[in-house]
Image (tube, helix red, strand yellow):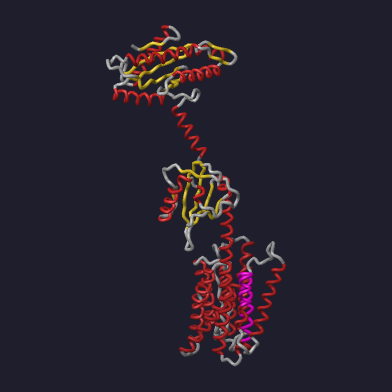
Amino acid sequence: MPIESPPRYRPALLSPPRLRRFGTRPGALAGFALRLVLVAGAYYVAGRLSLRVSLVQRQVTPIWPPTGIAVVALLLWGRRVWPAIAVAAFLVNAPIGPNPLVAAAIAAGNTLAPLLAATLLTRAGFRPELDRLRDALALIFLGALLSMTVSATVGTVALASVRRTSTAGFWGTWSVWWTGDAMGVLVVAPFLLSLRGIRRPRGTSWRRWAEASAVLAGTALVAFAIMHSRLRLEYLVFPLLGWAAWRFGQRGAAPAALITSAIAIWAAVDGTGPFAGLGLAQKMVTLQVFNASVALASFVLAALVAERRRAEQELRQSESRTSGLLASAPNAILAVGEDGRIRLANAQAETMFGYEPQELLGLPVEALVPVGLRAVHERHRATYLMDPGTRPMGLGLDLAARRKDGSEFPVEIGLSWHGSPEGGEITCVVSDITERKRAEQEIAYLAYHDKLTGLANRAKFDDQLGVALARARRSGGAVAVLSIDIDGLKRVNDQFGHAAGDELIAESGARLRGVARETDLVARQGGDEFLILLTDLPQDPTGSYRDAQAVVKEVARRVRDRFAAPFPIGDTELAMTASVGISIAPIDATDASTLLRNADTAMYRSKQAGSGEFVLYK
């Protein structure tokens, strides 16, 4: 960096989350004061040492480390440390400046440039770990190339105000000043940031520390050798820089780059190696290009390596999560390629389909489809591949799957598509719904059947009665309802208990089912009452329905006779009777409610007439 007056000092301003405010407590104030002293001291010492290696007496410094120190201080400790930067910059520049005003102006530029750098980096979401490519690029373009134009411009204008200089001289001074400050950020800042929290992590072997030390020592030896050789061998140091970045990230790349740049600066000052016989301008260009290449190659590569490792770690974590989800998922999960072969199957899939572990992999998915559904499945798969997405398979259809032993079972299948340039695959989530289907069937059965007897309940009886009456009206036939009441059930419950009463009801239902015709419907109305629906009764051309009445009476007699046999209840046999009332449509009624009411009326008449009798409504 060119510095005719004082070398410029720059602060860095990025306190990653937010500037922490120091309170008025003595401990907080002491900590803040200590930080100010550390920043000012580091800036001042680095500035004075840098002036010792100026290429031209106190005027041109190829790298200005205080700028990197200032940027890091502002990034880590916040804007509140800027006074330390400003004071230190003034103290460095005052002894060599034309006058105090020029030194103050240069100090102001050296303070504003790091402040701008830290502000821009903070707003760009910069992370001091430098573990992302975007952080490396932000440090290059925002922290170094852009922000350092402030210090170069302010310093060059301040010097030009007290001494005449040509346009070429002005821009020459500006460019060297800007380059020196930018190199201070690119070389020093990554090194200082890499020192944050440095320690030997648990689990890190001493062998790795020895490797890191060997890499840095090797970098120093190679850099020293090439900087004292008359051959152009500068490129030999880059493999070591790459090794440091690849194996140790920023904590290896930053020190290696700093060591290499320091040796190159020393060689430029002594005029050895690639700098031998070069003029000032050539030395500056050669040195700055080399140092920039070293800095950029090292910490950009380290950032890329960190991103790659983070991506690999995230991939491993994702794979671990996926494996955990697959293992713990209650459903079978299959991944099927576009060729129709299974690429992935979890343990539930192996259990559900009856295959050994890993046996499903590579198997055509059609092997899990019932033979009768394979043609339909192939058409559906072709249609799905034309418009893939996430949706249920065969919405509204009853799907089935096939086990290894050939048995079939009902399933639900959800499909989702995962595509890539190399091809895609279908993820199938298969649920065995055998138990659900069984439960649905049981619920549907209980909705229309009596649980105790297994007979139809009143709801089913009413539905069938309505259908039978409608059919009879169309055909001119007859329909009959028998209302049956078990006589003396209360006595059985009181004497033998409700369990005996339930046993009696179940046996009564079985006997009624035995006397009914195949076309008839026997139902339990509730309690001790039963109903029998007689359909398809013979038609009578005369309109008297005598034949129908004859059939109904015969069924009623069979009921009476079956109930005449003793009922075995436990160790006891009970003699039971049933009262039967009969109502016939269209003789007694033409609608369901009236027909049922008339049958009940006839049944009560039967009770009054005497147990075990049957009575017709008319």
Q: Is residue 256 visible?
A: yes
Residue at the extreme left of the image, as rendered: 542
Magenta stretch contains residue 261: yes
In the rendered image, which quarter contains the C terminus? top left
Instruction: Say which of 58 and 329 sits in front.
Output: 329
Where is 473 relative to 24, above or below?
Answer: above
Instruction: Tell which of 187 and 585 is nearer to you.
Output: 585
Q: Which residues are magenta?
A: 239-267
Query: Considering depth in this image, is 329 or 206 the residue closer to the camera?
Result: 329
Answer yes or no: is residue 41 visible. no
User: The N terminus appears in which quarter of the rendering?
Assistant: bottom right
Residue drawn at the location 49% of the way across and 22% of the way down: 453
Q: Position of residue 353 (x, y in %)?
A: 55, 46
Secondary structure of the magenta portion, mostly?
Answer: helix
| Res 59 quadrant in image | bottom right
- Tell me residue 539's x, y (percent): 31, 19
